[in-house]
Image (cartoon, grey):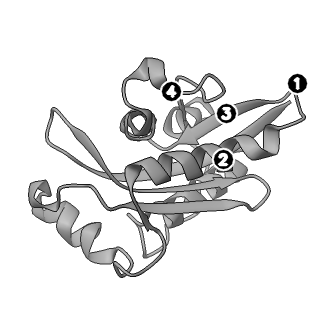
């Protein structure tokens, strides 16, 4: 049995560092997780990221804003809670163009060997699945693209559309 999570990360990257801004995760059963880091360096954001990501974040008083450590701990709980008592189920992570998303997620724990054993060492790529399935029609993205939770929900909708 497989328990699938669909997620998206918004981040600032400069070719050397992938700095998590926000992460949204949904599972197939309607559970959702959303967090915004209090620790990213907004001075390194290019104008596109500032306009399309940073300017759309919730108010700093919103409880979604958390330290990276708290995001890590809360996300770990969110991902592993449904699997407790289900030794035959395994977790799958899915994202659209998944490479950078996986780096941003994994870096919450530091270097790759620190990633907890129950969390996959890679994220499956919905974009590749779409190609492999012959590029079937997908639902349109919502106007609030580049909001990590909105995009995570859209990834689940893409999965369902691909059958």
The picture quadrant where one finds residue 3 is top right
Residue in view at x 79 percent, y 33 percent: 2
Quadrant the C terminus occupies: top right
Residue labelled with disc 1? 88
Residue at point 48% right, 44% down?
96
Q: Quadrant of the N terminus?
A: top right
Pointer 4: what residue? 115
Q: Tell me the SS state at disc 3.
A: strand
The picture places residue 156, in percent across and down from the top left corner, at 64, 54
Callout 2 secondary element: helix
Q: Nearer the viewer, residue 52 or 3?
A: 3
Real-space CA distance between mark 1 and mark 2, rounded to the nearest whole angstrom: 19 Å
Of marks 1 and 2, which one's residue comes earlier in the chain? Answer: 2
Q: Is residue 163 above or below residue 49?
A: above
Mark positioned earlier in the residue sequence (4 or 1): 1
Mark closer to the observer (2, 3): 2
Alpha-carbon span between mark 4 and mark 2:
14 Å
| Residue picked out by circle 2 | 77
Say whether disc 3 or disc 4 marks the residue closer to the N-terminus. 3
x, y (%) of residue 40?
25, 55
**Is disc 2 surrounded by few (<14), some (14 to 19) or many (20+) residues within 10 Å?**
few
Foreground mark, 3 or 4, reads: 4
- The spot of residue 101 in percent (x, y) is 41, 41
Give the spatial CA distance, label 4 vs label 1: 21 Å
Of tags 1 and 3, the one toward the viewer is 1
Classify residue 156 as left or right of residue 126: right
Tag on residue 46? Answer: none
User: Label 3 to label 4, Cα distance in Å?
Assistant: 15 Å
Disc 1 versus disc 3: distance between alpha carbons?
13 Å
Work out whether residue 161 or residue 126 is closer to the camera in this orientation and state it.
126
Q: Which residue is mark 3?
A: 92
């Amino acid at each position: 049995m497989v328990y699938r999570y669909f997620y998206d990360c918004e981040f600032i990257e400069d070719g050397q560092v992938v700095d998590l801004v926000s992460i949204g995760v949904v599972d197939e059963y309607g559970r959702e997780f959303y967090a915004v880091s209090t620790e990213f360096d907004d001075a390194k954001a290019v104008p596109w990221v500032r306009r399309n990501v940073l300017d759309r974040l919730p108010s700093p008083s919103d409880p979604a804003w958390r330290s990276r450590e708290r995001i890590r701990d809360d996300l770990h709980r969110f991902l592993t809670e449904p699997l407790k008592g289900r030794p035959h189920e395994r977790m799958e992570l899915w994202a659209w163009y998944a490479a950078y998303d996986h780096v941003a997620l994994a870096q919450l724990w530091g270097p790759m060997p620190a990633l907890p054993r129950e969390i996959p060492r890679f994220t499956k790529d919905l974009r590749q699945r779409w190609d492999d399935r012959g590029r079937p029609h997908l639902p349109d993205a919502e106007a609030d693209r580049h909001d990590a939770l909105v995009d995570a929900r859209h990834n689940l909708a893409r999965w369902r559309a691909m059958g």
